[in-house]
Amino acid sequence: MIELSGVTVRYPNGVVGLDDVSLTIPDGQFVVVVGLSGAGKSTLIRTINGLVPVTEGSLKVDGAEVAGASQRKLRDVRSGIGMIFQSFNLVKRTSVMNNVMMGQMHGIPAYRSLLGAWTADEKERAYQSLERVGIVEKAWTRASQLSGGQQQRVAIARALAQDPRVMLADEPVASLDPPTAQMVMKDLQRINRELGITTLVNLHFLDLARQFGDRVIGMRAGKMVFDGTGAEADDAV
Ligand code: ADP
Ligand code: ADP
């Protein structure tokens, strides 16, 4: 469960990224956050992940307070959160397998990953994650040789390999063409249904939000201005 209570985030330059946001996301929910550029969507995700400090209010992830938490505590919280980005953030010059392995290498010396010194369990889990997004046949392809949609699927597999309780996706389909965007959204939704991972997806297209949001949160100027179903979401932006 993710619980925000009166959360305000002010950046060092004085810009308010989140303005008194209160929001509870129960376990297993699939939530789409919509809003124009600058609305605060990515601040919301980065705050939940402990990358941006909470200025005021309380933010709990599975009961653990993130506001004012130590770096060590934040690392614990982050280890349960899979992140997906607009630009995929893969290491392009290495294999898909290496990229997925990095998902479960939290806190393990990087040389093991570089040497491919993985345990049988780790390898098995990486294959399973790739299978879940239907891309296991690309395991030994260089990430740079994949299309955008395939790269985003690898990024999803990398997040899954971490065995997260929460998935945070910051505009995961913004750089994909519409049919590919549909596929990636369907992957995220299916994974949410199959594994019960609480999922928060930022989108700036209302049509995708209508289609995929069991619950749609609308943001404007750092404030939450809408909380409803996809079918009601016409006024969300
Ligand atoms: P998006 O709209 O996709 O969230 P942006 O282009 O707004 O991305 O931001 C890209 C990067 O620049 C982010 O790391 C963000 O934190 C940073 N950034 C955005 N706005 C500002 C700002 N006014 N001052 C400093 N950094 C900013
Ligand atoms: P969105 O993801 O909806 O595009 P953001 O969360 O990126 O919105 O931005 C919300 C507001 O916070 C914007 O005014 C943006 O310029 C500002 N902002 C984002 N990141 C930073 C940053 N690192 N430093 C200062 N201002 C930022």
Image (cartoon, rainbow, N blue to C red):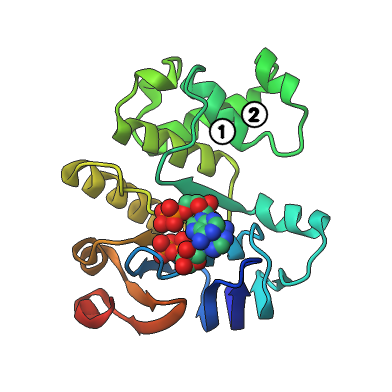
Q: Nearer the viewer, residue 17 or 4?
A: 17
Question: Toward which corner of the image does residue 166 lie, by quadrant?
Answer: bottom right
User: Is ligand 1 less than 8 Å from the beta carbon at label 2?
Assistant: no
Residue 164 visible to an observer of this rendering: yes
Residue 148 place in picture, x, y as percent = 31, 33
Residue 29 place in picture, x, y as percent = 44, 69
Q: Residues within 10 Å of mark 1 (few under 14, many from 20)?
A: many
For mark 2, give the secondary structure.
Answer: helix
Q: Is residue 88 left or right of residue 19?
A: left
Q: Which residue: 61% across, 59% down?
A: 49
Question: In the picture, which quadrant includes the N terminus?
Answer: bottom right
Q: Which residue is mark 2?
A: 121
Q: Nearer the viewer, residue 95 or 144?
A: 144
Q: Nearer the viewer, residue 171 or 127?
A: 171
Q: Residues within 10 Å of mark 2 (few under 14, many from 20)?
A: few
Q: Nearer the viewer, residue 215 or 169?
A: 169
Q: Which residue: 38% across, 68% down?
A: 33
Question: Toward which corner of the image does residue 104 lie, by quadrant?
Answer: top right
Residue 62 place in picture, x, y as percent = 66, 69
The amino acid at mark 1 is: Arg
Residue 196 against residue 237 in the figure, above or below = above
